[in-house]
Image (tube, rainbow, N blue to C red):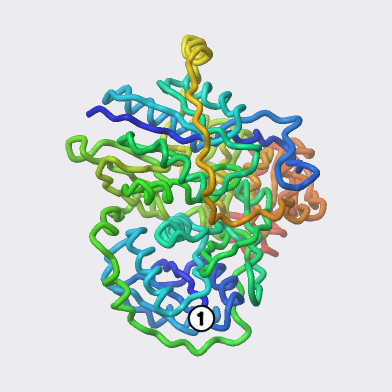
Amino acid sequence: MLVDILVCVKRVPTVGGVITLTADRRAIDTKASGFTISPHEECAVEEAVRLVERFGGSVTVVSLGPVAAEEQLRACLALGANAAVLIEESDGLEVGPIATAAALAAVASPFDLVLLGNEASDTGDYQVGIRLAHLLGRPVATGIKSLSPASDGSALSASRTYRGVLETFTLPLPCVVTVKEGINLPRYPSLPGRLRAKRAPVTRLPVMPGVTGDFQMIGLRMPDAPKKQATVLGHGAAAVPALVAVLEELGVTP
Amino acid sequence: MTALCLVETEDGALTDASARALTLARDLDDSLGAIVFTDGIVSSLAAELAQYGATSLYVVPGIDGYAPQAWARALAELSQHVGASAVVAAGTEHGNEVLAHLGAITGLPMAANCVAVKPASDGPLTVTRQRWAGLLLEDAELDAPVALLTVATDAVAPVPAAAPAELQATEATQVSQAVSAADLVVRAHESATGGGGQSLSSARVVVGGGRGVGSAEAFAPLEELASLLGGVVGVSRVVTSEGWRPHTMQVGQTGTKITPDLYLACGISGAIQHFAGCAGAKHIIAINTDPSAPMMTRADYAVVGDLHEVVPALIEALRTRGT
């Protein structure tokens, strides 16, 4: 069973202790932060590399983003991806989920399996993988935490837990799967991997223009400020009587 | 005109997430139709739905089990049939998945995890939705003949309507006939996880453990405390990265979002990705050696101290109190 796998990743800011917005309130201020891909996507890359290590085939990573997203593509190459494609976003405008799915569909059709993260950590649209699957006319499962070949390699068995119930889907190949953190523990890049990634070519493609229909951002804002200062109940075990009193007040004591 | 809301049930009862979705959906239009996929009995569910303002209940039979594309196909059919102005679902794995399929089938935009919607008499809706799992909010214009939205599971409080609605229940058999064999290719085979007990997302009390717990074995007192309080244990990301507990127990942006009455966070410093998962808790108590840790300053109550000392003392006090 050989599988050619496409993994879709997105360059997003590394969010640390505090989020600051740009002056126009349309983006996170990244002057002081780095960039990364979401944990779900790190797991998607790892899953693809493991599948190819076991069954043969190839891993291609693709990102729709600015030229700077080459940094994230090279990080994926260092983890074992064989090829990288950058679909160049024009003028830094945010691309919505309908247009993103259309851009990815333009490169995805030769692949047996397309892997994505369950949702991008920045926009959290929860739909690009599904829209992509519909454009390709392929089956799709989302939020997957376990993936293995089924039916002599002509299908995949994909499962996740929802409200305490294990849901298992059988997906005939070719198909689209979005995965969640926890499906595996991603490896660290090896030194030879990093050196290889530095020299590897990244194919650049222009974004397909004119796909519309997404909802339009007006602006970003922070949720309401966190609640008032915490009430300190005390120090160490001496705080336990006060703690029990609070639990009683909340009605959660046994 | 009417809005439609996909309703999820657990043991025949309305889920908390769906109650939140109904709360937001009922203000979108003159009437509110609830849609549920089941072959089972729904009489008690009908009463619950009426309390949340639903005026119609469409029961779609004949789609055995969860099949997201088939559910979306049936929703598309029903939405067209009743001339819906909006289709709403809970921002759960199922709700987001079915509405995304509906968006793909209809070619319409879908706004996930909304916390507020401003209806307009004409022109686009203004929706406020979560980004970064709720750490940021986005205001957006949703300009579509049918507004497709899901409702954040941890932001909109579930509030029954001022007066229960008069509810008309209909079996929507013709809707399931729109479903084709291709829509049923991907369907869930369901089995028990063996975990048993209550789920993290619906637990009333969650006892959280973070780096400060220190080892896999040191979770035993937290588990004892959780069971005493009728709750479950949740963990921060570092705990799953260390392999101390499985990822299914992770609270946070890439784990589970929780909405308990009480979150008792032990030895968790409080990275913002963790807050994204526990911001829906009604009350937070933090136990930490570092009084300046973000979790300690953002909690309602804080105990400065070592959880390995405080938690056993608390268990002891709760046991003594019980006798």
Seen as rendered, the residue at the extreme front is A210
Q: SS class of the residue under badge 1? A: loop
Q: Residues within 10 Å of mark 1 (few under 14, many from 20)?
A: many
Residue located 53% across and 39% down the image: B219
Q: Amino acid at mark 1?
A: Ala
Q: Nearer the viewer, residue A4 or B98?
A: A4
Residue located 69% across and 37% down the image: B306
Residue B82, quarter of picture: bottom left
Q: Position of residue B7 (x, y in %)?
A: 45, 70
* Residue that mark 1 sits on: B54
Q: Nearer the viewer, residue A56 or A206?
A: A206
Residue located 56% across and 60% down the image: B153
Residue B156, quarter of picture: bottom right
Q: Quadrant of the C terminus of chain A?
A: bottom right
Residue located 67% across and 36% down the image: A15
User: Viewed as shown, does residue A6 lie left or right of A35?
Assistant: left
Q: Position of residue A7 (x, y in %)?
A: 43, 33
